[in-house]
Image: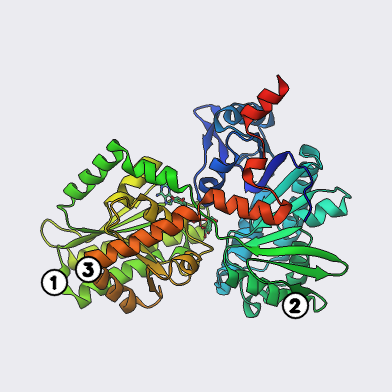
Amino acid sequence: MTDTGMRRLVVVSNRLPAALKFVDGEWTVKGGAGGLVTALAPVLKNRGGLWIGWNGAFGAEEESKRLLDEFSGEAGYELKGVPLTEDEVKKYYFGFSNEIIWPLFHDLQTRCRFDPEYWRSYLEVNFKFAENVARMTSSEDFIWVHDYHLMHQAFFLKSMGVKRSTGFFLHIPFPPPDIFLKLPWRQKLILALTEFDLVGFQTTQDRYNFERCLEMLAPDAKVSGEGAVVSVELRGREFQAGTFPIAIDFNQFDGMARDREVAHEAFRIREALKHRKIILGVDRLDYTKGIPERILAIRELLRLYPDLKGKFNFIQIAVPSREDVDEYKDLRDEIELLVGRVNGEFSIPGWVPVHYHYRSLPQNELTSYYAAADIALITPLRDGMNLVAKEYCACNVNESGALILSEFAGAAAQLQEWAYLVNPYDLEGVAKAIHRAMHWDIEERRDSMKNMRDQVRSHNIFWWVDSFLQAGISKNLDDFPSVETVRFENN
Ligand code: ADQ
């Protein structure tokens, strides 16, 4: 692809990295959490970038503009809102995105509700987003669309005759044909993806799945090339498809874990738990993350090895997510019931095995937990990447922790040589892996953690963005001007 002299990086996603809330009679704005924000905020900061998305509220457009402008100043990049109605959010976001694509792409098709109303709303909202993107950007910008809510952006921009250089990154897995073909709108959806100039996936397996689905649904598509990025020719045009495993700002987490306050808090956590082994789980509360199965694996561990009673604590930290959805409320109830059952079955005076926290933690507190934990137990049933696995490694500055990781997490492709890979459905297998990790030779453990840290350090968030931009527009992140450069040039 040729150098087009682009000036601005524009991120488009369903939600902005800030949400508007009406509290005590007035509108306020608060920074959001989650994988996408963690990954992209350090990238846009101080580069004069723009982020386009929904602000999380209905109406209040004047207030929204003012508050987002205020937030932009602090965030170091511009934020612009796309207004959505309650009905749109209900059908496009909760409906199509979260009741169809989310479960289907995570191989959980029995949870899908293929309602045609959802599909229509998804198209309408994608059209509305594309209209806003066209208005808020210029042909010199690189439009980087994120995730499964907005797969029709390039399609609608083109149908409006708007010329933009576009890239798309899918944060969740791309399913194999036997699952993808169940989608009633499979052909329209996959063809819409081919309208981007670059389509990025978390793992090579996801990209293969996409290629296989495309070859089945559009037999004239021709894939050529090898390596991380391949070319696809279809009906007279060419686009790229690539593998770009998302990453974290390693130095930020590593630095935070070395902070005195954070290290002290980590020590306090260990002391409060009487220096027993700490096993840690950290997730958004979502059925793909395998939290109930993980608690059952802890029960299995105590059944198989009763002598472990009183010798460890399992801490599960779950950040509230999609709380208005019944399925997520049910999941929360299920988890709380299981925690109660396991604690009821195995507690002894002065010791309960499972500590469960249902809340979002500030980053320094989360870092203290990472730094305190002997074992991270990360067992999603399916996950695009899983940033928690990488954050744990980055925070393990004394290089003595062990990572037990689901083979169905995208992160397994990068960390498989050094992590304990497990099948999250195999409760006995997970329990045995925990037992082995607890008794793992310290030298081997250090060696593995060191290797994982090296991998996460070298393949960090800046590497990720650079690889995507190189593939999309032959540019690096540094080619996008920092705010200081712009000011200097204007003077
Ligand atoms: P998520 O499903 O949100 O992201 P993940 O990658 O695990 O999943 O990221 C979660 C983020 O939330 C992490 O940065 C973590 O620190 C934070 N977090 C979790 N629990 C928290 C808590 N209790 N308090 C505060 N913060 C908490 C989607 C895909 C993933 C993919 C990412 C990025 O589902 O597979 O890795 O996008 O592409």
The three-letter amino acid code for the residue at tag 1 is: Asp
Horizontal relation, residue 464 to residue 456: left or right: right
Q: Nearer the viewer, mark 2 or mark 3?
A: 3
Residue marked by disc 2: 215
Q: Position of residue 327 (x, y in %)?
A: 50, 61
Q: Earlier in the sequence, mark 1 or mark 3?
A: 1
Q: Inspect this view and state whether residue 82 appears.
A: no
Q: Nearer the viewer, mark 1 or mark 3?
A: 3
Q: Position of residue 353 (x, y in %)?
A: 22, 61
Q: Earlier in the sequence, mark 2 or mark 1?
A: 2
Q: Earlier in the sequence, mark 2 or mark 3?
A: 2
Residue marked by disc 1: 307
Neighbour class for label 3 at 10 Å: few (<14), some, many (≥20)? few
Element type at marker 3?
loop
Q: Residue at x 40, y 61 (%)?
A: 452
- Say if mark 1 contacts mark 3, CB within 8 Å: no
The three-letter amino acid code for the residue at tag 2 is: Glu
Residue marked by disc 3: 441
